[in-house]
Amino acid sequence: MIHAQYNPGRSRGFTMFYTSVLVLVIFLLSLSLIRFTLMTQLSSVSYEYEFGALQAAEAGIQKALFCLNTTEGTNCGGAYSITYTGETDVDFGDNSFTTVVTGSGSLRDIESTGTTSTGRFVKLYAKVSSIPDTDEMALGFALQSGNAGAHLENGATINGTLYANGDVECVSTQAVVDGDIFVAKSGGWIDGCQVNYHAYADIILDCNVNGHAYYRNDPADIAGTTVGGTKYPSSPTPTTEDLPEPDYGFWQTSAEAGGTISGDHTVTDGQSIGPIKVDGNLIFEAGASVTITGPIWAVGDVTTGNGTTLQLDPAYTEYSTVILADDTADPAGGGHITLDNGTSVLGTGDPQSHIMFISTNQSLDETDAALDIANNAAGAVFLAPDGVLRLRNNAGAKSLSAKKLWLDNNAVVTYVESDLADIKFSNSPSAAWGLVGGSWRMAN
């Protein structure tokens, strides 16, 4: 029988081998752990620095918003509101930020760079806006009437289009429409007018039409009319166009936000007014120069004296606002607007800026007009959706809309599409500056 013999040297060799392998594994694991710990610490430090830079850049955006909205610049590097263009190396804890603000009008771009003490930086971009709340009313025509139509005396001139949902009557062809006339009424007519462009109505009588004539029956519905262009009998009746529709609740609430004056109120020379509700009649004193600083709602009549000047606050820039006469308790008898001789109505100076006068009075009698305009209203637009709007001798305006229009001798309306097609009626010069949604981003 053969017996295995124990070899202590060989056993020690295996033990040392396994021990060495174990030590090596432990050593490698230790190195990996140390490396992981170091990398984690480095990543943590890197993240901390990057996060600090991001926080500083975000603080720069917020500081820029604060300075655009403030009215005092002591903490904004000497400039504030719309004059603020940013700051350089503003301390934010151990870090800092630099901002650059560019743009004009109601939009601005903000670039903010946050920098750590070690030189790490993050750059952010954002857009901000101060566009105020608005009431979108489209003014597509020089004159627009409802179903009560329009009446033009001798010498009345419309530089633009007259669109009527009722009949159009001119006293003679000395009443001139330097544009088109549309009558959107079945069986409706244009009578006795000088039309320098085209005429569209079922019946066109005793007119001079320099352009084309679109009418119903030939020759009965074109009798007495001279047509310089082409006659188009059997033409369809033009489509009815709605008058501009104000958001009355918006304007009433906006005016009331500035407070309420009980009873009648007279505005004197050098004063500013608006936003305000006048729970009575509103009178602008003769010869007074008045700044309109917000929407006005008079629960009664609005009148101006001879030589009154009303100008919209220049802070409105390209925006317009409203003076509303709305007697909710007596719409048949109250809510008249009367602009006396020599009254001047001006916007801010921007061609798209105007004051709109709105009367809700329901009178269709031109001797008791809902809205009665004397002259010099070059910066104004007028609306009487339920009554008659009368433009008197030598009066001027940008745009008129009413249930019934009445133009006296030599009254002039000049519609400039670029001034009125995109008009924006606002309840304030501007809103607080705020971020434009989706515009905040980090530089690549």
Image (spheres, rainbow, N blue to C red):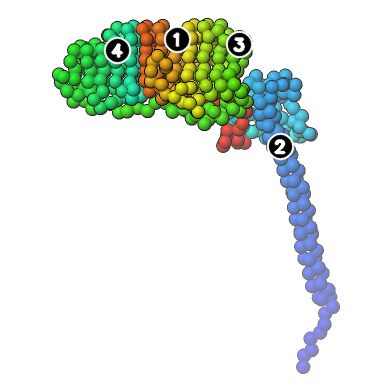
Task: Identify the amino acid type marked 4.
Answer: Cys
The label nearer to you, 2 versus 1, is 1
Q: Which of marks 2 and 1 is nearer the N terminus?
A: 2
Look at mark 3 in the image and give the residue it sits on. Answer: 268
What secondary structure is found at the residue carrying circle 2? helix
Residue 430 or residue 135, whichever sits in front: 135
The label nearer to you, 2 versus 3, is 3
Look at mark 1 in the image and give the residue it sits on. Answer: 374
Q: Assess whether mark 4 and mark 2 are in contact (beta carbons under 8 angstroms).
A: no
Q: Assess whether mark 4 and mark 1 are in contact (beta carbons under 8 angstroms).
A: no
Look at mark 4 in the image and give the residue it sits on. Answer: 170
Q: Which residue is drawn at 32% across and 28% down?
A: 240
Using residue 145 as the reference point, say whether residue 119 is left or right of it.
right
User: Around disc 4, counting alpha carbons within 10 Å, would you say few (fewer than 14), some (14 to 19), or many (20 or more)?
Assistant: many
Task: Identify the amino acid type marked 1.
Answer: Ala
Q: Where is residue 103 in the image (x, y as percent from the top left)?
A: 58, 23
Q: Where is residue 325 in the image (x, y as percent from the top left)?
A: 50, 22
Residue 172 or residue 305, whichever sits in front: 305
User: Around disc 1, counting alpha carbons within 10 Å, would you say few (fewer than 14), some (14 to 19), or many (20 or more)?
Assistant: many
User: Around disc 3, counting alpha carbons within 10 Å, would you say few (fewer than 14), some (14 to 19), or many (20 or more)?
Assistant: some
Q: Earlier in the sequence, mark 2 or mark 4?
A: 2
Q: Distance between the residues labelled 4 and 3?
A: 40 Å
Q: Distance between the residues labelled 2 and 4?
A: 71 Å
Q: How far apart are marks 1 and 3 (CA)?
A: 20 Å
Look at mark 2 in the image and give the residue it sits on. Answer: 55
Q: Earlier in the sequence, mark 1 or mark 4?
A: 4
- Compared to residue 318, the image places residue 45 above or below, namely below
Residue 154 in sight here: yes
What secondary structure is found at the residue carrying circle 1? loop
Q: Position of residue 33 (x, y in %)?
A: 77, 56
Q: How far apart are marks 1 and 4 (CA)?
A: 20 Å
Task: Identify the amino acid type marked 2.
Answer: Gln
